[in-house]
Image (spheres, rainbow, N blue to C red):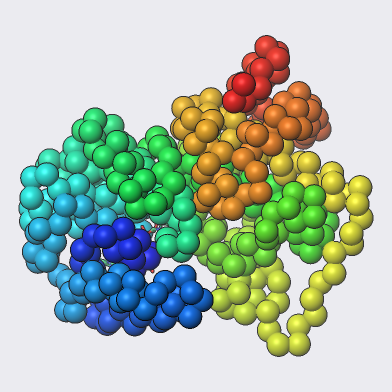
Amino acid sequence: MGSGIARVAAAAGHDVIIADAVAGATQRSQANLAKTMDREVDKGRYSRDAADEVMSRIKYHWEPIGDDLSPFRHCGLVIEAIVEDLETKRTLFRRLENVVTADAILATNTSSLSVASIASACEVSGRVVGIHFFNPAPLMPLVEVIPWLGGEMTIAPAAYALMKQWNKTPVLATDTPGFIVNRIARPFYGESLRLLDEGVADIATIDWAMKTFGKFRMGPFELMDFIGNDVNYAVTRSVFEAMFFDPRYKPSLTQKRLIESGFFGKKTGRGYYDYRAGAVVPVPSQDEALGRQMFDRVLAMLINEAVDAVFMGVASPEDVDLAMTKGVNYPKGLLAWANEIGLDTVLGRLQALYDEYGEDRYRPSPLLRRMVRDKQRFFA
Ligand SMILES: NC(=O)c1ccc[n+]([C@@H]2O[C@H](COP(=O)([O-])OP(=O)(O)OC[C@H]3O[C@@H](n4cnc5c(N)ncnc54)[C@H](O)[C@@H]3O)[C@@H](O)[C@H]2O)c1
């Protein structure tokens, strides 16, 4: 992630310094960037000169960085994209604040930790902010900007404006578990896993349904295999725990067993699907009625999550829809989709699930109920 973010900043005209704690990491980063920029030139997206200029703006700290963070002393902005471990991040921020100038902004790219828990390590913590990119950073337009409780009022707007200058699509999110995207996307995986666990359909049929009726680029099982089941499960668990075990975010035992078996997805050759040579590719049943029913159920859960994020003040309706289309390529914003289907229809589907299962997981958001009662629509 660090290398990708560095390329975005350099492409926007900034001088960038990359450093890493592990020997050889910055060398690999430079080699990867050179390869990627060659590809960009081949594809005609960059001229050779422009690509060379971007690369020339990035300076690498070749030695593994230890306690001495002085290479960052002249930086106006430092974006931390190190290992997702709270204590390691806190230690880094504590050291960073001692070397940078008084007006430097310190940002974290954390996906699953609270910005507050990292920022509070600093003595002068008001200049810390979350700037959360999506992978790969040069390709994905979305950036979640996350102010925290102790942040200075000017810092998040400054980060937001800077991301616009960097040609990104910034959205504002509160410092809550999963921010916008990693919270609202949970049912795409979770409800699909639930369908699998209940034996409603197999993985190929569920993936087929979401792609055919929802026009999602990848089905949930293909996507989990692509992301890595270890990574996807870790995010699910962290959101579940951080939400004080709200059943809406409950992880699936099926996914846990997969990880225990070492089936992490594409990278290990096996996940939900088998990627080894000669493996039989499962064929979806293509039962249209079943496909539609499953798609309607997963979509209702996604919309409920999006509506509830608005209800709980995580982000504005506009930013919720931008986040899901620009951060994870959803074919439509979920709230615009809700308008299209009819909020009353979505509420009806959720209520039917709630009545059938009696589980809190299916409770409709109070905002959805309220809007249906008052005959409101989003963006009206
Ligand atoms: N991978 C993603 O899709 C993604 C997306 C958004 C945000 N993030 C976040 O970005 C951060 C990095 O993720 P990643 O996937 O690039 O991880 P990664 O493990 O690929 O890279 C982390 C790098 O940090 C280095 N590092 C570890 N401890 C360090 C320290 N104390 N000082 C300096 N460098 C140190 C490691 O050597 C490694 O090169 C995490 O906080 C993650 O949550 C990741």
Q: On screen, 208 above or below 322?
A: below
Residue 74 x %, y %: 10, 58
- Asked whether residue 10 is in view, the answer is yes
- At horizontal 63% and vertical 33% (from top left) the residue drawn is 335
Given the current orientation, which residue lies at the most extreme top position? 374
Q: Quadrant for residue 138, please give it.
A: bottom left
Most foreground residue, 130 or 67: 130
Residue 343 screen position, x and y as percent:
72, 26
Which image quadrant is residue 119 in? Answer: top left
> Is 74 placed left or right of 46 in the picture?
left
Instruction: Count the labels in the image.
Output: 0
Residue 118 placement (x, y as % from top left): 26, 47
The location of residue 172, given as percent across then percent down, is 40, 37
- Residue at 47% across, 32% down: 315
In the rendered view of the protein, which quadrant contains the C terminus? top right
Residue drawn at 46 percent across, 53 percent down:
141
